[in-house]
Amino acid sequence: MLLMASVSQAEEPVCRQRGDPENPQLFKNGDIMIGGIFSFHSSWKNRQDTFMHKPLPLECTSLHFREFQFAQAMLFAIEEINNSTDLLPGILLGYSFYDVCGSIARGVKAALALTNGNEVVPTSSEAPCTRPAQVQAIMGDTSSSPSMATATVIGPFHIPLISHFATCACLSDKTKYPSFLRTIPSDYYQSKALAQLVKHFGWTWVGAIRTNDDYGNNGMATFTETAQQLGICLEYSVSVFRTDAPDKIQKIVDIIKASTSKVIVAFLSPSDMDVVIHALSHHNVTGCQWVGSEGWIFDSQTAAMDRHHILDGAIGLSIPKAHVSGMREFMLDVRPLNSSSNYIFTEFWEALFSCKFNQSKSSAGNHRECTGYEDLTGVQNSFTDMSLMPIFNNVYKGVYAVAHALHNILNCNKTCNSTVQLDPFTILQHIRKIQFKTKEGDEVYFNENGDPAAKYEIINWQPTENGIVDFVTVGFYDASLPADKQLNLQNNSFIWAQNSKHVPLSVCSEQCPPGTRKILQKGKPVCCYDCLRCAEGEISNITDSITCVRCHPEFWSNDRRDACVKKEAEFLSYEEIMGALLTAASLFGTCMTAVVAIIFFQNRPTPIVRANNSELSFLLLFSLTLCFLCSLTFIGRPSEWSCMLRHTTFGITFVLCISCVLGKTIVVLMAFRATLPGSNVMKWFGPAQQKLSVLGFTLIQVIICILWLTISPPFPFKNVKEFKDKIILECALGSAIGFWAVLGYIGLLAILCFILAFLARKLPDNFNEAKFITFSMLIFCTVWIAFIPAYVSSPGKFSVAVEIFAILASSFGLLICIFIPKCYIILLKPEKNTKKNMMAKGGP
């Protein structure tokens, strides 16, 4: 504010304010003054300045009854404090209220007027043209943008500015607005609460509309940021202001009509909400679920404006309900003739009752004459409506905060120290630190940002039979609680858009069920996606999963791809047909070998049994029995012992078997060689040497098996790679070298035996056993040569079956080729079972 020094006619130096003075609309002198900035009028007449002369003052229009209520609440608090003997005893609070008509510029001017005053102040050359502030604190403004401007101007002077309804989170910045405080929570918490509320009902695809000012823009920015963190997408976000051109309003209506989202988050002031309702009503846009901020959600005037029930079922946050005893009666006891400021109250009274004071007959028109004693009891309008009592309570708490700070500064007990020089900075510091309870039990304090505790009620618009909207409390939000307990919905009897009992669905894409995952649609927000079925072996067991999880190797996905089921364990068991057949073949071979052994034992004195070392024959039958039985170790669930036993038993018994056959083959060769004149070869390969050769050949295999079991033995293994939906229980070889060494040694002996038998096949004898050994070895080698590719290529349990088949086939080959011809002679041709016949030379 620019001041200038001028000289009067008496040449006395004075300080005068530049420009036209601003006079308060309501004023009462007191020991300590408190200012108030309200918009008793909501707008002003437009004018076109010519810049040829000084602009005229604003001509305010459209009385705003709500602002009168706020002013009345402040008057009630001041009167209550002045009549109190406990708070500021002996101190009279005065007030000075300014009407700023909703103009930011006029609000700044009013704040400066409250700071400096309008009087002409004499001064001497020794004193500067300054003085203490006119008021010690200012209550107001109602909106965020005017409060920001006012706080910016008076902040450097540290004059407390306490707002009851300015919620913009930006006002919490104490570097920009050091003297600003408020008794209503910051929109920072409200915006986060709205996002959590939207998320709670599963609305991930919403539209947004906001007031194009600091309140709406900052509030929506915080909501958008929180919504993105919670996975909520905005289909559109538009701004509106009550002075916007009709074509801009039409564009907003068109966007809402064309949208696919069913939920609209509205961060609007009541006046801007009225503009939106009017436009949507004109185009019959209904069926949307509205989520509202505290600016309009509990405003009964907004509900009354919604004649087409566009907002039915709306849900949102409101300031918790409040009751201040005596305030309603005080407000309704207003009388213009009792007021010291008759002008503003006269205009208010005339608008309230549609009458005129002191009107002449010529100007009577349609208005009756006001008496000043009209009864407010039967009047139904925004002034008599007490739905904004929570905001009136905020005004009330703001005045009491100033009073408690002054009470502490003035060291009040039964009386106050009126000699204390008041300083706005000191008052501001005390207000920030105060903590008290109102007569209704409400706790009042400010945090480091000058904000109160953030607590909200969640209300639902529920239309009644008579068409009046009932604001039903359905839950609470308390930002001071842990994150998972802040939102508390208590009532399940919600009414949604179009009087529906079911929660509306507002998503860009339907939820992806378990068994699928989300794939984002190109060029669209993250809430728009397609559902892709999980691949085999992968699952998702939650809705809207972004990934499919691969099952554990021992598990596989079910058909729905929403759970992992344990894979079927596959191994060659006794219960299945193939296992049973192989078991039967093994037991049959064992029994057949036993029968042959019995026949041989019963006929052991006969030449055919005694020929070619009967002991080797019995040892061979014993080894063949073991060969048949060892195949059983390959059947059944593999275990650590069975894995080690099956291959080593197989290796040792087969070497024992082949060693016996090899011994018999050598005996045949040596026997015919011994018939040559002068040959004594049989003494080098007699029965003892035959037994030692069998023992020696077998011992080598035993050593190989011991080394194999010691270094890297076979072990049970779950093969999960062979089949995608099965686990093959098998025996891993451990050391492949050990396995192939065992087989290789058996093969080596078999080939050696085959070669020797082949050489002895044409030796002259009526019963040359070498021929049968050759044939048996041919079968043996053929089986095991064919085994190798069959074993390698057979999957799962079939590889085990191939190995069992090779064991049984080669064992049967040896048994049948070597012993069945002898049994045939013993049983069916006993006449040939003579020494003479055995020694006779066979024909060609």
Image (cartoon, rainbow, N blue to C red):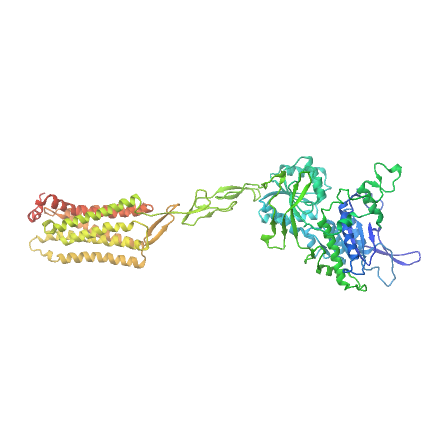
Residue 114: x %, y % from top left? 80, 54
User: In the picture, residue 405 is in which quadrant?
Assistant: bottom right
Asked if one can make out residue 785 in the rendered structure from this viewpoint, the answer is: no
Q: Nearer the viewer, residue 174 or 663?
A: 174
Is 224 on the left or on the right of 611, as rendered? right
Is 839 on the left or on the right of 430, as rendered? left
Residue 99: x %, y % from top left? 79, 48
Please, which residue is most extreme toward the right here? 10
420 vs 72: above or below: below
Asked if one can make out residue 21 in the rendered structure from this viewpoint, the answer is: yes
Q: Residue at x 27, y 58 (%)?
A: 706
For the N terminus, give its image quadrant. bottom right
Please, which residue is most extreme toward the top here? 283
Q: Nearer the viewer, residue 275 or 659?
A: 275
Q: Residue at x 75, y 62 (%)?
A: 408
Is 142 on the left or on the right of 686, as rendered? right
Q: Nearer the viewer, residue 794 or 292?
A: 292
Residue 473: x %, y % from top left? 65, 47
How many numbered markers are drawn? Answer: 0
2 vs 356: above or below: below
Residue 334: x %, y % from top left? 80, 48
For the C terminus, give its image quadrant. top left
